[in-house]
Image (cartoon, rainbow, N blue to C red):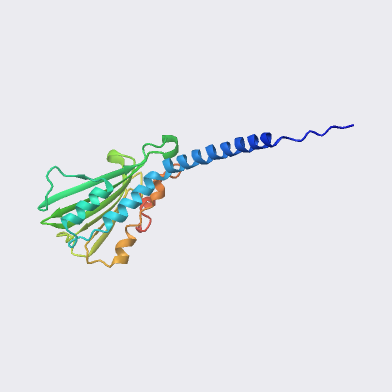
Amino acid sequence: MDILIKPTPYGNRKKVCQVTAIIIVFLASSTAASFYLFRPSMRARSVLSQVSALQVGKSGFLDAQHIASQIGATSSDFCSPAYCSWGIRIDNLALPEQWRGPGAAFMARFQVRNSLVTEQGFMFQIGDGENAQTAEFDEQDNWPNFPKQFIVGTQTTDNNPHYRSFVKLTPALPADVRQRYLSFDFNCLWKYGGCKNAQELLPTVEWK
């Protein structure tokens, strides 16, 4: 006569607990890895959103000081309503080089003179040093050497047809046009291999 041995309730519970523990560890590891990978891009988006909300020629010293405190920006040695500048850099150099490639960095800066925000700028770059490829955005009350409301330009080299792009504008520019040139591709901070040139950093700039 065959004897059927049924698993005890305790045995079932033990197996369930083991499987649950494995799933929890897997999910926790995946979450930690995702946070580690995406943190630079998420932080860059947040910094861009907060700094670009400052209005050149309208926002005051306290507004700028508050934003600087929120994002952890570093101020100039001398900082008062008469003059102060702040800057912050976010990069992905903590990721393995085999994943990120040459690496990418996003920088934001803003400045106050006579109690008003007079300038703000952003630069997104691949690599470092004189060979860094960059996409730049600068906004000022006025540009003495540029009579137009905004200038969009590109720069090439013998070895790189998409070396540098730059946008210079004033607050008189319509908000939708301004936003167009703030559309940096922050995927460059996390995707495998990174981005290859300045065209990928700010795709809305048209290259000749």
Q: How many numbered callouts?
A: 0
Residue 155 seen anywhere in this rendered image of the structure? no
Quadrant in the picture for the C terminus: bottom left
Q: Position of residue 127 (x, y in %)?
A: 34, 40
- In terms of image quadrants, where is residue 60? bottom left
Q: Residue furthest front?
A: 9
Q: Position of residue 25 (x, y in %)?
A: 53, 37
Q: Residue furthest right?
A: 1
Is residue 117 left or right of 207 when viewed as pictured? Answer: left
Q: Nearer the viewer, residue 28 or 119?
A: 28
Q: Nearer the viewer, residue 72 or 105?
A: 72
Residue 181 seen anywhere in this rendered image of the structure? yes
The residue depicted at 42 percent of the width and 35 percent of the height is 96
- Whether residue 90 is situated above or below residue 46 in the rendered picture: above
- In terms of image quadrants, where is residue 159? top left
Q: Nearer the viewer, residue 172 or 29?
A: 29
- In terms of image quadrants, where is residue 98? top left
The residue depicted at 71 percent of the width and 35 percent of the height is 8
Q: Nearer the viewer, residue 122 or 63?
A: 63
